[in-house]
Image: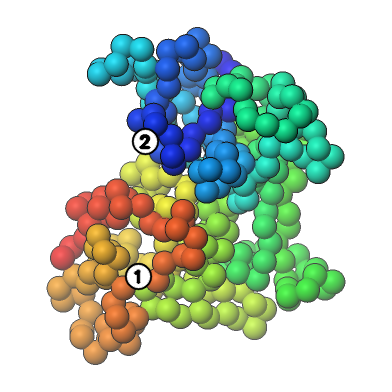
């Protein structure tokens, strides 16, 4: 098994299904075959909207394209998908590439599938999943450390640092690590505000009350990406997980019959009954995940 970088872009002519399948010409078949059962990092150029390495996921298996014998699909383990807390640029601060096999000169990448070393993989993972600590990303509860000199913080969480000897693949499989990374990214995308009530509550230490809710839950192999998340207050999160509230195709809120008296609902949800969306279109809930919640969980 080998780790690799897959170039994937929203403007690609290939039949990629983000989080589900990677479409590629069979000229790359021998390389992609080496990644089965291992982790790959996704990269997108400037034309795609997000520039740099932006997510990591495990490859499950390869199947032929039934409509084109010259192409195949790498089927991806949906539950393993984890978005980065920040896109990682191709080059480090010292202008050397994160991938040691790439030329130092800046220009177009020459190969859409590139096998990388464990050291390069670890360097990109460490940079992409380095905690972005802001007042919005503080946890609701749990141990914190005091950092009196950090502006904007009464308290702050300990940062993510791994020694060279730690296996990044094991870290990426850790549920507690993934939960923390997912929560920080969702809270940041929604600016620590509940997307259904509009409330932004904080305690005396600056901790936001809002929680990160999976749309497709972990138990149903939902991915840990912002497009599968919504920032919700505790009560609304409880209702969402139990199918008492959901989101329609146009992002209007759906409230199950008899789940809340009309006067309570009028106080609990935003007046226009529409989901408050992130400023970044790339972080808006994916229609497929919302459809899964409506069809599988909603008790309307």
Residue 37 appears in the rendering: yes
Would residue 100 be found to the left or right of residue 83 on screen? right
Crowd band around label 1 with a 10 angstrom C-alpha radius: few (<14), some (14–19), many (20+): many
Q: For mark 2, does the 10 Å Cα neighbourhood hold few (<14), some (14 to 19), or many (20 or more) residues?
A: some
The answer to whether the residue labelled 2 contacts the one labelled 1, judged by CB atoms less than 8 Å apart, is no
Mark closest to the chain's N terminus, 2 or 1: 2
Left or right: residue 189 versus residue 10 is right
Q: Badge 1 is on which residue?
A: 275
Marking on residue 82: none
> Does the rendering let one see residue 144?
no
Task: Give how far apart the Cα atoms at labels 2 and 1 are.
Answer: 25 Å
Q: In the picture, which quadrant includes the N terminus?
A: top right
- Residue at image position (16%, 76%) is 258
Disc number for residue 17: 2
Query: How many numbered markers are drawn?
Result: 2
Along the line of sight, the residue nearer the viewer: 150 or 146: 150
Question: Which element type, helix, strand or loop, lies under badge 2?
Answer: loop
Q: Position of residue 265 (x, y in %)?
A: 27, 82
Q: Find residue 94 and report its horizontal and vertical position in percent.
A: 84, 39
Q: Nearer the viewer, residue 257 or 225?
A: 225
Q: Residue at x 40, y 52 (%)?
A: 228
Colour basis: rainbow
Query: Regarding mark 1 in the picture, which secondary structure is present there?
Result: loop
Which residue is painted at 82% across and 73% down in the image? 148
Q: Position of residue 209 (x, y in %)?
A: 52, 74
Q: Nearer the viewer, residue 105 or 121?
A: 105
Percent x, y for residue 95? 81, 37
Q: Is residue 27 above or below residue 38?
A: above
Relative vertical location of residue 162 with respect to residue 259 in this rendering, above or below = above
């Amino acid at each position: 098994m080998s780790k690799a970088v897959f170039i994937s872009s929203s403007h690609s002519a290939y039949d990629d299904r983000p989080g589900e399948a990677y479409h590629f010409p069979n000229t790359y078949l021998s390389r992609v075959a080496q990644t089965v059962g291992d982790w790959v990092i996704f990269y997108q150029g400037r034309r795609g909207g997000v520039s740099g390495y932006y997510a990591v996921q495990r490859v499950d298996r390869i199947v032929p394209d039934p409509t084109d014998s010259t192409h195949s699909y790498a089927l991806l383990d949906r539950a393993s998908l984890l978005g980065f807390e920040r896109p990682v640029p191709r080059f480090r601060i010292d202008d050397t590439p994160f991938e040691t096999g790439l030329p130092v000169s800046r220009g177009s990448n020459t190969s859409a599938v590139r096998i990388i070393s464990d050291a390069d993989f670890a360097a990109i993972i460490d940079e992409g999943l380095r905690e972005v600590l802001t007042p919005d990303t503080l946890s609701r509860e749990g141990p914190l450390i005091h950092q009196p000199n950090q502006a904007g913080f009464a308290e702050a969480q300990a940062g993510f640092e791994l020694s060279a000897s730690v296996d990044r693949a094991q870290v990426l499989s850790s549920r507690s690590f993934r939960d923390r990374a997912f929560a920080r990214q969702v809270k940041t995308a929604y600016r620590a505000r509940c997307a259904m009530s509009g409330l932004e509550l904080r305690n005396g230490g600056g901790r936001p009350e809002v929680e990160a809710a999976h749309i497709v839950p972990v138990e149903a192999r939902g991915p840990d990406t912002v497009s599968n998340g919504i920032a919700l207050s505790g009560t609304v999160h409880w209702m969402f997980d139990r199918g008492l509230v959901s989101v329609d195709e146009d992002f209007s809120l759906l409230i199950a019959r008899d789940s809340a008296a009309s006067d309570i609902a009028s106080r609990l949800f935003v007046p226009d009954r529409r989901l408050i969306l992130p400023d970044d279109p790339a972080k808006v809930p994916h229609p497929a995940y919302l459809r899964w919640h409506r069809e599988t969980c909603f008790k309307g």
